[in-house]
Amino acid sequence: MPVRRFRSVGEMEGPHWYEPGDPVLFRALRRVWALHARTVQPHFPPGIYRHRSLEAMNRLQEQWDEANFLQHRRRLEAARIS
């Protein structure tokens, strides 16, 4: 992603969004998704889960988040060692 430099705050006021359908938008999205796939790689068990309460659903989500975080840390440590 290119770095943009501005001489004043006035130069920053232009639109920073891509127009829908712009090929540049699709390339940018592809790059972000590729970065996500290389770095985060979250895993959510497949299936449909029923919960008795919102709290039960939140506990399960927190367990998945914690497992994903620990897996990410293990991958970082393994990359640092090798």
Image (spheres, grey):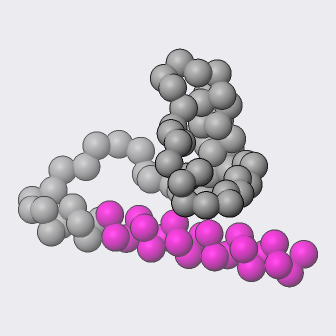
The magenta stretch spans residue 68: yes
Q: Is residue 59 above or below residue 37?
A: below
Look at the image and say whether residue 57 sits in the magenta stretch.
Answer: no
Q: Is residue 57 left or right of residue 15?
A: left
Say which residue appears at 34% left-offset and 70% top-offset: 62
Quarter of the figure with residue 60 = bottom left
User: What residue do we see at 62% from left, 69% from top?
Assistant: 72
Q: Residue at x 51, y 66 (%)?
A: 68
Direction top: furthest residue: 21
Magenta segment, prevailing SS (helix, strand or loop): helix
- In the depicted view, which residue is nearer to us: 38 or 70? 38
Give x and y (percent) for residue 66: 45, 73
**Viewed as shown, does residue 60 lie left or right of 6?**
left
Query: Residue drawn at (67%, 75%), measured in percent from left and top?
Result: 74
Q: Which residues are magenta?
A: 61-82
- What is the residue that sits farthest to the right in this orientation? 82
Q: Residue 78: x, y in percent?
A: 78, 75
Residue 40 visible (yes or no):
yes
Quarter of the image with the C terminus is bottom right
Of residue 7 and residue 43, the one placed in the foreground of this image is 7
Residue 80 falls in image quadrant? bottom right
Residue found farthest to the left: 52
Q: Position of residue 31 (x, y in %)?
A: 68, 41
Q: Quadrant of residue 57?
A: bottom left
Q: How many marks?
A: 0
Indicate whether 79 appears above or below 43: below
Q: Position of residue 73 (x, y in %)?
A: 63, 76
Vertical comparison of 6 with 16: above or below = below
Residue 37, above or below 7:
above
Q: Is residue 50 left or right of residue 35?
A: left
Is 13 or 58 nearer to us in this picture?
A: 13
